[in-house]
Image (cartoon, rainbow, N blue to C red):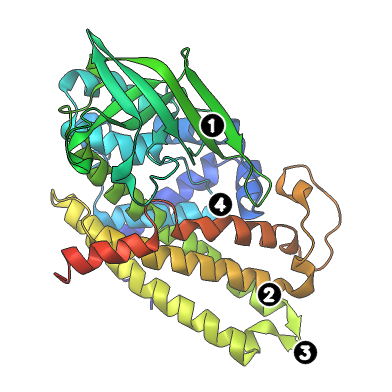
Amino acid sequence: MDLQFTPEEEAFRAEVRAFLQQHLPRDLAAKVQAGQRLSRFDLENWQAILNRQGWLAYHWPREYGGTGWTPIQKFIFDDECARAGAPRLPPFGTSMLGPVLIKYGSEEQKQRWLPRILSGADWWCQGYSEPGAGSDLASLKTSAVRQGDHYVVNGQKTWTTQGQHANMMFCLVRTDRAAKAQAGISFLLIDMDQPGVEVRPIRTLDGDAEVNEVFLTDVKVPLENLVGEENQGWTYAKYLLTYERTGIAGVGFSMAALERLKAIASRVQRHGRPLSQDPQFATRLAQVEIDLENMKTTNLRVLAAVQGGGVPGAESSMLKIRGTVIRQELLSLTRRAMGPYALPYIEQAQHAGWDEPPVGPPEAATAAAAYFNYRKLSIFGGSNEIQRNIISKAILGL
């Protein structure tokens, strides 16, 4: 069932919808809805549009450029953006680093870095995972040794999303090798446009290179780029991850994907009747819709907790698990709806300007690529297995 909104909330929805109709570039929305790859220009352009409206960092406090929206308003905004085909912006600056700086950063760091996040002057990436330190993040080995007024950083990060575009990285480093794993980690802000930083792309299943390896060799980082206290980075890392996991859930995008899937199922014929009337397919479609409705309620609970001054807790792990499973099921059903037309992999179809006549339903050209690429959802941000461990300890007390 749909949520019931007040007249004021419906007026806000109308405002957001009007803004999107006027300012969301049509060609950009078409690329998003067709499942095509977005360029750096596409993302920077949409970020600049939102920033001019004052809606980019809508979950930040007003004093730092946020909106002061209620949880319902945030939900409505995400919902309308997804339905309109607005791109999902990289979360690293606004949704991950921003909240950490606001809570733990010095006043100088807030004044320096937060405006640059909003303006797009800095493109951030996340230096967390390493070879042998993914879900077991506390075993990371990248070191930072203090020398005078700076740290010298050596090590390797991997699966660094959008690292090929980034000029800055927020990075977990080991500053005390004698301490136990979690106690010897610090949180640094690293300029990637300097000697000693090497970025190597990793080709993914869909043929893209959105993730990278980053090698750090004698990289100098000023002491003022240490966030919070030395050796307390694990606290900041966990805080950041709760925001990342909440965002990975992608409620609005799943709702939009469900609507598209319903349209496909009503249009595609199977055995002489719409696929939506196939008992097996209809059962799976109904189940994922029920799961999504339940997740919407949990998402609002988490937003309400943050609005009241709290932070996303273990509930963010619940959202991450359910959200990724739901999105993967939607992609699986979309691919299944294409039948044999989803078998060919057409790499060119993921780029704007591809105008070959479709073989089968038009969605078939990108259905398989999306399905395989987003198998990663249940792994990054802390695998779903790790999230279940967090829930069992933090919520169930096991």
Q: Is residue 296 left or right of residue 35?
A: left
Circle 4 residue: 85
Secondary structure of the residue carrying numbered label 4:
loop
Placement of the N terminus among the 4 image quadrants: bottom left
Q: Where in the figure is residue 287, as x and y percent of width and height?
A: 47, 82
Q: Looking at the image, which residue is at 33% across and 50% down? A: 136
Q: Secondary structure at mark 2?
A: helix
Q: Amino acid at mark 2?
A: Ala
Q: State the mark number for residue 235.
A: none
Disc 4 vs disc 2: which is toward the camera?
2
Q: SS for tag 3?
A: loop
**Amino acid at circle 1:** Asn
Look at the numbered discs 1 and 2 and tell me whether their residues touch, using CB distance below 8 Å.
no
Q: Which residue is mark 2?
A: 337
Q: Which residue is mark 3?
A: 271
Q: Amino acid at mark 3?
A: His
